[in-house]
Image: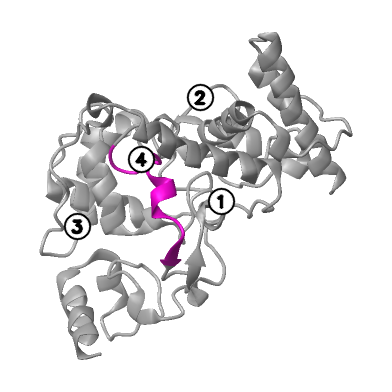
């Protein structure tokens, strides 16, 4: 066991002691120096491990970002939180909820061409949505986040019907046309800039960037990179239609589609080796914005649409097999 992992495991153990003693400063315990105890996470009270996982999802930039005091915990280069998209630390039902994560894994990932589990998916997000590095599989952070996600499923199963009710507009339907970033710019200025800023750089949670954002940056160095799922126009439009503007999700399909395009033509960090994604290129989504592809549609069409002809091409290709 590495010294840094041993110290952080001891740190999590400190949470258990704090919980038993009725301490109220859990956050202080999470940031405290670890010591050299080698108690295994498996022996930690589940509540403490899951609470650490919840905090990592809710306060990712502060706990795992580049201003984290411990250099061994600086895993992400963005200043986003997982909760920037997975609202209420993923516990809110609806689009991008994390409540059902445990039901979805293990599963095959076309992007990696392999069977993946929850831990693999966490690291995909770390490298893409958070523009960072993968967590070691045996680290307290990985164990805590995975435990928290699995616990959300158990909580969901024990929740009554009213707690599972989703309050969202009708699901997004992709318009049969190419997205229009210029129209999207106008939608952004009218409906999105009040929270995300006129230049899409978000609203900081405090004076220090290390504290992350109340409303996340949508492009630029602090945002997700070009390998993230949110960099796909249809994926982004589905989330925007369902959730944005926050508390007033009233955009039309066309508005959500175009504002997603506007956001995704803006500069953002690049992820290396994207050409290695989707070993079977026929499994690439129609709106995947980078090649190579198993078709002859232009790159611009993969980025902005129309997507229906691409979907029809692969549907026909699959039918021939």
Q: Residues within 10 Å of mark 4 (few under 14, many from 20)?
A: some
Q: Quadrant of residue 241?
A: top left
**Residue 116 in the image: above or below residue 5:** below
Nearest the viewer among 36 and 215 is 36
Q: For residue 265, which numbered disc appears in the image?
A: none
> What element does badge 4 sit on?
loop
Marks 1 and 3, Cα distance to the nearest angstrom? 30 Å
Query: x, y (%) of residue 300?
Result: 28, 72
Res 109 visible:
yes
CB contact under 8 Å: marks 4 and 3: no
Which dot, 3 or 2, sits closer to the camera? Answer: 2
Mark 4 or 1: the one toward you: 4
CA distance separating discs 4 and 3: 28 Å
Q: Between 204 and 231, which is closer to the camera in this rendering? A: 231
Q: Residue at x 20, y 74 (%)?
A: 311
Q: Main secondary structure of the magenta part?
A: loop
**First in residue order: circle 3 vs circle 2:** 3
Q: Which residue is mark 1?
A: 126
Disc ID at residue 205 = 2
Query: In whole angstroms, how far apart are the C-alphas of marks 4 and 2?
Result: 22 Å
| Inter-mark Cα distance, 4 to 1 | 17 Å
């Amino acid at each position: 066991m590495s010294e840094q992992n041993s110290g952080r495991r001891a740190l999590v153990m400190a949470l258990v002691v704090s919980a038993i003693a009725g301490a109220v400063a859990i956050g202080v315990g999470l940031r405290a120096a670890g010591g050299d105890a080698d108690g295994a996470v498996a022996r930690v009270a589940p509540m403490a491990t899951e609470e650490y996982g919840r905090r990592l999802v809710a306060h990712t930039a502060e706990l795992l970002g580049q201003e984290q005091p411990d250099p061994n915990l600086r895993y992400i280069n963005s200043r986003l939180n997982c909760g920037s998209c997975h609202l209420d630390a993923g516990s809110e039902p609806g689009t991008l909820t994390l409540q059902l994560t445990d039901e979805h894994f293990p599963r095959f990932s076309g992007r990696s061409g392999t069977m993946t589990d929850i831990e693999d998916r966490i690291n995909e997000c770390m490298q893409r949505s958070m523009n960072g590095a993968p967590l070691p599989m045996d680290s307290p952070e990985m164990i805590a986040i995975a435990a928290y996600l699995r616990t959300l499923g158990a909580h969901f199963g024990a929740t009554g019907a009213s707690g599972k009710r989703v309050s969202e507009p009708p699901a997004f339907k992709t318009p049969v046309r190419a997205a229009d970033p210029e129209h999207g710019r106008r939608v952004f200025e009218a409906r999105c800039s009040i929270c995300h800023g006129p230049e899409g750089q978000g609203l900081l949670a405090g004076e220090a960037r290390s504290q992350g954002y109340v409303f996340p940056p949508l492009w630029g160095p602090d945002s997700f990179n070009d390998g993230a799922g949110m960099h796909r126009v249809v994926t982004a439009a589905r989330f925007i239609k369902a959730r944005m503007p926050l508390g007033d999700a009233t955009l039309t399909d066309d508005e959500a589609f175009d504002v997603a395009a506007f956001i995704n033509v803006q500069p953002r960090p690049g992820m290396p080796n994207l050409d290695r994604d989707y070993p079977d290129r026929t499994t690439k989504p129609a709106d995947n914005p980078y090649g190579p592809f198993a078709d002859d549609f232009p790159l611009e069409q993969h980025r902005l649409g129309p997507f229906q002809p691409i979907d029809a091409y692969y549907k026909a290709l699959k039918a021939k097999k």
